Amino acid sequence: MTTMDDEAAFPDVTATRCPDLHAAIRAEITSLRLPPGTQLQEVALGHRFGVSRTPVREALQRLLRDGLVERFGRFYRVIRLTGEEVREFCELREALECMAVTLAVRREPGCAADLEALIRAQRAALARGDLDAFNDLDGAFHLRIGHAAGNRALLRQLETLHDKACLVRGMEQRRPYWSGRVAEEHGRIVDAIGRGDAAIAAAEMRYHIRSVIALRPAGWAAPP
């Protein structure tokens, strides 16, 4: 079991007070700097980020609601997704995102310009080796489609899935050439949106989401 006491496993991010502790810990989790199964202790996190236990406790409770951590005895730990859980998550995400891109083509096809800009930024982040920025832009790409769908209920569901999708993306980056493949698949989705072809856009989105299962990393194993 990995714990927060394993200093070598966790490079120091900041020794100063963190203005948004929830966002900081979330970034550590989704980037895998806090790997799945890591035990999270309030005192150790407080020392790490230079804050008291109270904001740490509040941040962990928010992360529990986000579905990124779970209770483990008296402590919390980063969730470990089994292969079955990844499959179920991707099936749900596929249904919602295919609906979103279909509606986006019909209601805001002009979103293609914004999406192309996000892809260019993704490629630039990849070129400089900034995988955190790459992941953030990946999420922004999918949520931009959600906004273009013009359905607030659907957007809320996509936002709910957003954090866990970030964790899955972080795991996927263990696969060779995965990040470059993502940008290419995003490009095909945007090309279909630009042509106003909802059916092809949905098909490209379906392929994009299903590739997560097809290329699942060996690290996704059920916890003991």
Image: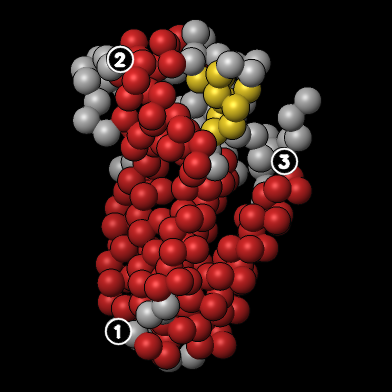
Horizontally, is 165 left or right of 88 in the view?
left
Closer to the eye: label 3 or 2: 2
Q: With respect to residue 78, does 213 lie above or below?
A: below
Horizontally, is 218 left or right of 176 in the view?
right
- Report the amino acid beneath label 2: Ser
User: Label 2 neighbourhood size at 10 Å, few (<14), some (14-19), many (20+)?
Assistant: some
- Report the amino acid beneath label 1: Gly
Dot 2 corresponds to which residue?
52
In which image quadrant can residue 214 be found? bottom right
Mark-to-mark CA distance, 1 and 2:
47 Å
Where does the image place residue 80, in percent across and percent down from the top left? 64, 34
Where does the image place residue 12, in percent across and percent down from the top left? 34, 17
Dot 3 corresponds to which residue?
82
**First along the sequence among labels 1 and 2:** 2
Mark-to-mark CA distance, 3 and 2:
33 Å
**First along the sequence among labels 3 and 2:** 2
User: Label 3 neighbourhood size at 10 Å, few (<14), some (14-19), many (20+)?
Assistant: some
Q: Which residue is found at the position 55% from the left and 85% from the top?
A: 200
Q: Which residue is found at the position 74% from the left and 29% from the top?
A: 223
Comparing 152 with 29, the one in front is 152
Dot 1 corresponds to which residue?
110
Q: Quadrant of the N terminus?
A: top right
